[in-house]
């Protein structure tokens, strides 16, 4: 059998962004090969049966929710519905639970959310409506700018941003958020602890809320209200599976178990990739949809980058202020309830459906300090999802999957994680049992992942699923670093996508879409 010809493009990484980029490229007529280090596609968008004795309980070990992709054209462009992709919208998307049984639902409708807040504080309800009125125009502009090249944005999107700049109130609110921490921005506007807690939890999905210049993380609230939140039916793994079917129909192909050791660079241009087993793959172009520090510091041979750019690449921040992720997933033989919180509400909201946010602003702030100093926070703030609440297909009939996540454990604890894991697991479960009824008697088994284990499973340094810390200095054309923004790398033949590229993490597909469009534009113009 004759050997396959060299592809036009090698895509490194079969996470959802790599697959999105590959689909756009293949549908444009290019011969595309995707290489993936793991033995399965999906990256941080997988669904897996990880609990021994519970093979029908599907877990999403990284990403659970889809928000930004719902505001993009990715699914429509690639006709993902034709390839089996379906979502279930989660309504309301998020709910803050306090220790006394109170709760505040964050709906897509700001007015409805304000009514939930009003039960705790009429003043905070008015402040919330005012904040959303101020942030919605900025959110619309941000969504447009997310879907363009940050170095060479589309003119119509730049003009839209300019219209925002002509609105003094809109500019003023953004300036205020950009110069404050999320914690400060929340405390300036809101008084009730449960209101503060819910907003702090939402803002924490970007970066530590006590860090300066993170006030802009509050933009996630209007983003949720514009896009809503959904989960793929059957688990997050449906997304990469649908993308692979799209890619295959367009003539592209995927190789799993193909780990890249380094790029092949000849004449100052990337010409392919060399795998860890020594195999050399050649291509006209390489698009790396994986973690930027590895792409720029490990895969490029020493001396490829000019010294000043090599120094910038070496200092890309990935430590998340010393905070790391800890996850527990449980398979249950029956249905969990939240009796205290359900009884305290005056409506018929099914509390099993939304993502639950637990932990006060003070708990989160203290957790950031403790984690950064190598201590395990107590109590541990967390987010919880009864995955089978909104999507019963992820568990056998009448049974549940519960996912618990905390982003406030120490990356480098005073004692090693091999020792700390058991006590962290015990404390986490005990804390969760204050909110979920039935864990102890219904549990079949559990899966627990510490930060080092997450690093090993995802092959991402420090287990940082954001790839690059989400700070104001690492956004837009500065993501992942000055000189590396805009997807086209300083080395000819190399493009960057993934969570470490604009507009950053979350399940959006936008880094893949925009990297592919940049590459295609360069091919049309003969630039590269």
Image (cartoon, grey):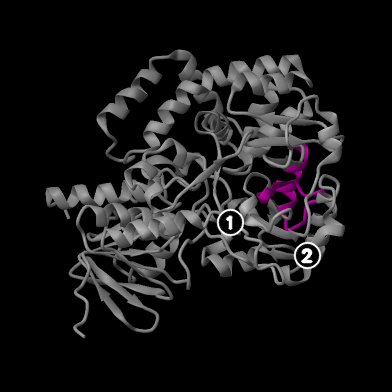
The image shows residue 320 at horizontal and vertical percentages of 59, 51
Give the residue displayed 56% in from the left and 52% down from the top. 63
* Left or right, 494 with reference to 424: left
Residue range corresponding to the magenta coloring: 361-388
**For the image shown, how many numbered marks are present on the structure?**
2
Circle 1: element type: loop
List the residue tagged with mark 1.
62
For this rendering, which residue is in front, 335 or 73?
A: 335
For this rendering, which residue is in front, 394 or 481?
A: 394
Residue 200 visible in image: yes
Circle 2: element type: strand
Q: In this view, does 69 lie above or below 186?
A: below
* Left or right, 363 with reference to 297: right
Q: Is residue 411 above or below residue 278?
A: above
Quadrant including the N terminus: bottom left
Mark linked to residue 444: 2
Residue located farthest toward the front when viewing the structure as drawn: 397
In this rendering, which labeled residue sits more in front, label 2 or label 1? Answer: 2
* Left or right, 67 with reference to 247: right
The image shows residue 385 at horizontal and vertical percentages of 68, 48
The image shows residue 164 at horizontal and vertical percentages of 40, 20
Queried whether the magenta region covers residue 471, the answer comes back as no
Q: Is residue 85 above or below residue 103?
A: below
The image shows residue 131 at horizontal and vertical percentages of 59, 20
Give the residue displayed 46% in from the left and 53% down from the top. 239
Residue 378 visible in image: no
């Amino acid at each position: 059998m004759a050997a396959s010809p060299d592809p036009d493009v090698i895509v490194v990484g079969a996470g959802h962004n790599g697959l999105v980029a590959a689909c756009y490229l293949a549908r444009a007529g290019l011969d595309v090969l995707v290489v993936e280090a793991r033995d399965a596609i999906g990256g941080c968008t997988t669904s897996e049966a990880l609990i021994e004795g519970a093979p029908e309980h599907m877990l999403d070990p990284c990403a659970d929710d889809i928000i930004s992709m719902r505001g993009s054209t990715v699914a429509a462009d690639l006709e993902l519905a034709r390839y089996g992709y379906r979502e279930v919208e989660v309504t309301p998307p998020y709910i803050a639970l306090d220790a006394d049984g109170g709760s505040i639902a964050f709906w897509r409708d700001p007015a409805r959310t304000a009514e939930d807040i009003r039960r705790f504080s009429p003043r905070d309800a008015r402040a919330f409506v005012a904040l959303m009125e101020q942030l919605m125009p900025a959110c619309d502009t941000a969504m447009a700018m997310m879907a363009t090249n940050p170095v060479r944005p589309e003119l119509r999107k730049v003009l839209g941003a300019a219209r925002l700049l002509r609105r003094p109130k809109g500019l003023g609110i953004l300036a205020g958020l950009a110069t404050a921490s999320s914690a400060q921005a929340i405390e300036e506007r809101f008084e009730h602890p449960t209101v503060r807690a819910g907003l702090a939890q939402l803002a924490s999905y970007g970066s530590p809320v006590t860090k300066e210049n993170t006030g802009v993380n509050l933009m996630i609230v209007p983003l949720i209200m514009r896009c809503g939140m959904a989960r793929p039916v059957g688990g997050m793994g449906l997304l990469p599976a649908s993308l692979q079917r799209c890619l295959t129909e367009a003539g592209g192909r995927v190789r799993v178990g193909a780990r890249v050791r380094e790029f092949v660079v000849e004449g100052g241009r990337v010409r392919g990739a060399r795998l860890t087993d020594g195999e050399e793959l050649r291509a006209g172009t390489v698009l790396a949809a994986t973690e930027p520090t590895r792409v720029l510091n490990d895969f490029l041979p020493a001396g490829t980058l000019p010294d000043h750019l090599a120094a910038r690449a070496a200092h890309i921040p990935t430590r998340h202020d010393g905070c790391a992720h800890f996850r527990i997933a449980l398979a249950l033989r029956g249905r969990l309830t939240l009796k205290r919180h359900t009884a305290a509400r005056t409506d018929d909201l099914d509390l099993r459906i939304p993502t639950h946010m637990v932990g006060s602003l003070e708990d989160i702030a203290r957790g950031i300090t403790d984690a950064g100093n190598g201590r395990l926070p107590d109590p541990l703030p967390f987010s919880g999802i009864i995955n089978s609440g909104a999507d019963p297909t992820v568990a056998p009939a009448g049974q549940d999957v519960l996912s618990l996540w905390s982003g406030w454990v120490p990356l480098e604890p005073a004692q090693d994680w091999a020792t700390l894991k058991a006590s962290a697991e015990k404390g986490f479960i005990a804390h969760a049992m204050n909110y979920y009824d039935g864990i102890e008697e219904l549990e079949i088994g559990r899966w627990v992942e510490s930060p080092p284990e997450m690093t090993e499973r995802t092959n991402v340094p420090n287990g940082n699923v954001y790839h690059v810390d989400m700070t104001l200095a690492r956004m837009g054309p500065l993501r992942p670093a000055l000189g590396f923004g805009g997807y086209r790398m300083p080395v000819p033949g190399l493009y960057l996508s993934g969570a470490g590229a604009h507009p950053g993490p979350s399940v959006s597909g936008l880094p893949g879409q925009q990297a592919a469009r940049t590459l295609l534009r360069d091919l049309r113009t003969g630039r590269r």
